[in-house]
Amino acid sequence: MKQTIIFSGTCAANSELTLVSKRIEFPFNLIKFVPSFALGTNKTLQLKLYISKDKVAPTTGTPSGINILGLFGEDPYVIGDDEQKSLDLLIEYKDSGYYIKVYANNTDNFGHTVDTFVIIESLED
């Protein structure tokens, strides 16, 4: 069964924000990361995707866990302007008890909305 986890918030000007999912109580595949960037973001909002065993959301600095985008790509984050991106992942987590975190770093002098979702699929029957 697939599930969509929605992350939304506002990252103030020249600041950072970490949004954290509820605890995932079953083994799962991380299938897709879909961030949206509003018009005027001008590639100043960097988004990173983390998997972690804790729910800690620091107010400054990157969160604990593994930066999924940093594992495979040249850049450890995604940026955009007036667009939605869709990143296929397909990473298996055989244990339960994980949290998904979206970290935002806003380097602009204006606040920006964080609007993204992650799709997971249960490995249980």
Image (cartoon, rainbow, N blue to C red):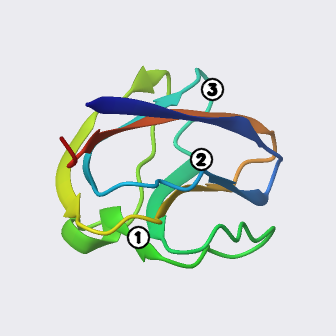
Provide the residue designation for mark 1: 67
Indicate the position of residue 39 as horizontal and vertical percent values.
Answer: 58, 20
User: Considering the numbered disc 3 on the image, is that residue within a helix, a strand or a loop?
Assistant: loop
Provide the residue designation for mark 2: 45
Q: Which mark sits nearer the N-terminus, 3 or 2?
A: 3
Indicate the position of residue 107 as horizontal and vertical percent values.
Answer: 68, 56
Q: Amino acid at mark 2?
A: Leu
C-alpha gap between disc 3 and disc 2: 10 Å
Where is residue 91, by image quadrant? bottom left
Q: Which mark sits nearer the N-terminus, 2 or 1?
A: 2
The residue carrying pointer 2 sits among few (fewer than 14), some (14 to 19) or many (20 or more) residues within 10 Å by Cα, namely many
Q: Which mark sits nearer the N-terminus, 1 or 3?
A: 3
- Residue 28 in the figure: left or right of residue 14: left
Q: Amino acid at mark 3?
A: Gly
Q: Is residue 39 above or below residue 101?
A: above
Residue drawn at (60%, 74%) of the image: 54
Foreground pick, 31 / 44: 31
Where is residue 56, by image quadrant? bottom right
Indicate the position of residue 94 as horizontal and vertical percent values.
Answer: 23, 66
Q: Quadrant of the C terminus?
A: top left
Provide the residue designation for mark 3: 40
Mark whose residue sits in front, 2 or 1: 1
